[in-house]
Image (cartoon, grey):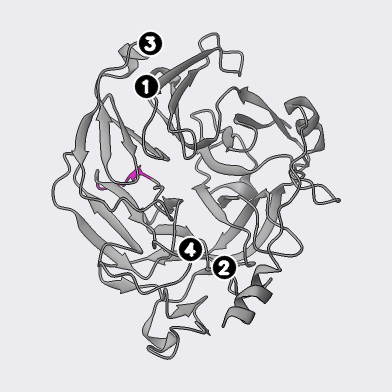
Amino acid sequence: MKAKIFLMLSLIVSCPIQAASVDEVLKQLQLPVGFSISLFAEDLANARSLVRGEKGVIFVGTRQQGAVYAVQDTNGDGKADKRYVIATDLYMPNGVAFQNGSLYVAEVNRIIRFDNIIDNLANPPKPVVVFDGLPSDRHHGWKYLRFGPDGKLYSAVGAPCNVCEPDKEIYATLIRLNPDGSDLEILAQGIRNTVGFDWQPGTNTLFFTENGRDLMGDDVPPDELNQWAEPGQHFGFPYCHGGTIADPEFGKQRSCEEFVAPAWQFKAHKAPLGMRFYRGEQFPERFKQQLFVAQHGSWNRSQPHGYRIAMVKFKNGRPVSEHSFISGWLTSSDEVLGRPVDILEMPNGSLLISDDNLGVIYKVTYQK
């Protein structure tokens, strides 16, 4: 076993981080004809999840920094000119959500709420604890947070390991609860780590990304796009990966046929994170109701890949193909210029994209 682990560890590479300016990075990015990308906000160290509040305020969660930011374009020139620090020293406050004037923040072990935040950006109130019964493990502990069409808060609790049989039911699950923190439900199990989900326009079907386990090789197992339909579903972790691949350690205990197979398979280690179905009117018709996915990029692969925004094309409600929408954060010499994390659609149909490597938010627009 030790020899096998050593062999797998030999595949791990640390892609060199290129110390390029934002302007230099923007020149390297490649988009379809008619699209352009610009800097919307900067000086947001480890910028991760995004949510839009009232008055055009964009809230930004982080993982490594422990901070939550807010930025605002007050003069309407397409670039944020106001920056606020809402909180510091939080426990990996990756997830942010907004409802009825309040900002909700998901830390590793709890969900907190900042009330009447829009009128107090420069002097934020002390947060109210909404729910504090989540595990405190750092491993896959950072959380995504969204309000669903039913008005409830949705999040997930990752597995506290690369691969293991978690000793508590709450691990490796998709969860939801009321905005006041009551009635926590476990909606699905067997989900190693998801930090991105959205509801399909027209059907309100919940789709979520999932990062597959490491140390099985360059191309195994695939990362996943999963579709949730009803409470009680199990998506396979740690017994089965990608719908058909038995885990070498746990796979003999249960058959892959027992679990929900992914709706789409991404190549292994691309690390799909934030995702959004496009609902706007700015982009051409072929992009409407298609799924944009931030692929954060590989670390457990001898030849790195990911580091891009992909578009998953849907037909008749199901994913049928995957295409590159924005590339160039990974150079031909495998230098990393940036790492996209989350995607947010603006009211005018443009997209915002966070980059936790550069600590910036990009803006993507289309013009004929």
Is residue 316 visible in the rendered structure shown here?
Answer: no
Looking at the rendered image, the disc whose residue lies closer to the viewer, 1 or 3, is 3
- Indicate the amino acid at tag 3: Ala
Which residues, given as a range, are shown in magenta? 145-150
Answer above or below: position of 229 versus 25. below
- Disc 3 marks which residue? 122
- Disc 4 marks which residue? 317
Looking at the rendered image, the disc whose residue lies closer to the viewer, 3 or 2, is 2
Q: Earlier in the sequence, mark 4 or mark 3?
A: 3
- Disc 1 marks which residue? 54
- Determine the secondary structure under disc 1: helix
Quarter of the figure that contains the N terminus: bottom right
In the rendered image, residue 87, in percent from the top left (x then y), is placed at 37, 24
In the rendered image, residue 60, in percent from the top left (x then y), is placed at 46, 30
Q: Which mark is residue 214?
A: 2
Q: Earlier in the sequence, mark 3 or mark 2?
A: 3
Q: How far is disc 4 from disc 3 in space, using C-alphas?
A: 44 Å
- Indicate the amino acid at tag 4: Gly
